[in-house]
């Protein structure tokens, strides 16, 4: 007598994949869960009786559903607006470590490292100038001279 049937094992795999999806929110494990759930159903119906057919069913259904629906799911459930993860930097103070020319790039020393920096209003900033972070533009920091 078996402790768990093959269909029940696939249901457990589907549940673990859903739990993993909750932690990653990547819409990868979700489709593994779909593959495991469909494999459980087909195993319960007797369509995939042996482990080889079950594994093949799981792989094919997971990959096909991932390829067809992941981009669509990310568009629907993903964030509609780009969230700037560096928004909390705005207003912080830093020091210019490499002079920032009028319309060019320089560097600031901020949070223990060097960052590429641009002047907020195109005003040149000399090395050693205290600045305030006005905006983050990708990996560039937009700064202006701090009022002392």
Image (cartoon, rainbow, N blue to C red):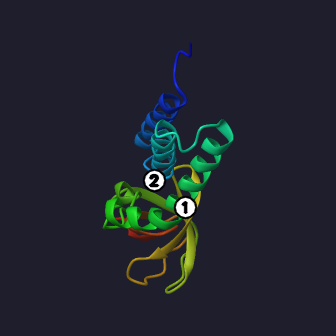
Mark 1 vs 2, N-terminal side = 2
Is any atom of residue 9 visible in this view?
yes
Tell me where residue 71 sits by quadrant.
Answer: bottom left
Task: Single out the residue that lies furthest toward the top.
Answer: 1
Q: Say if mark 1 contacts mark 2, CB within 8 Å.
A: no
Residue 54 location, x and y as percent? 60, 42
Q: Secondary structure at mark 2?
A: loop
Nearest the viewer among 102 and 24 is: 24
Is any atom of residue 132 visible in this view?
no
Q: Secondary structure at mark 1?
A: helix
Residue 130 location, x and y as percent? 44, 62
Nearest the viewer among 80 and 40 is: 40
- The quarter in which the C terminus is drawn is bottom left
Residue 35 location, x and y as percent? 51, 48
Identity of the residue drawn at 40% across and 57% down: 85
User: Taking 94 as reference, is 21 above or below it?
Assistant: above
């Amino acid at each position: 007598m078996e402790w768990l049937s093959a269909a029940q094992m696939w249901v457990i795999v589907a549940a673990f994949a859903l739990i993993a999806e909750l932690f990653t929110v990547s819409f990868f494990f979700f489709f593994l869960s779909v593959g495991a759930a469909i494999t459980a159903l087909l195993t319960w119906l007797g369509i995939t009786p042996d482990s080889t057919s079950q594994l093949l069913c799981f792989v094919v259904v997971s990959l096909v559903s991932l390829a067809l629906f992941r981009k669509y799911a990310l568009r629907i459930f993903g964030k509609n607006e780009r969230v700037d993860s560096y928004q909390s930097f705005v207003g912080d103070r830093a020091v210019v470590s490499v002079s920032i020319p009028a319309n060019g790039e320089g560097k600031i020393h901020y949070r223990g490292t060097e960052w590429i920096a641009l002047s907020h209003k195109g005003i040149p900033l000399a090395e050693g100038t205290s600045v305030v972070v006005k905006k983050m533009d990708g990996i560039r920091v937009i700064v202006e001279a701090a009022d002392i």
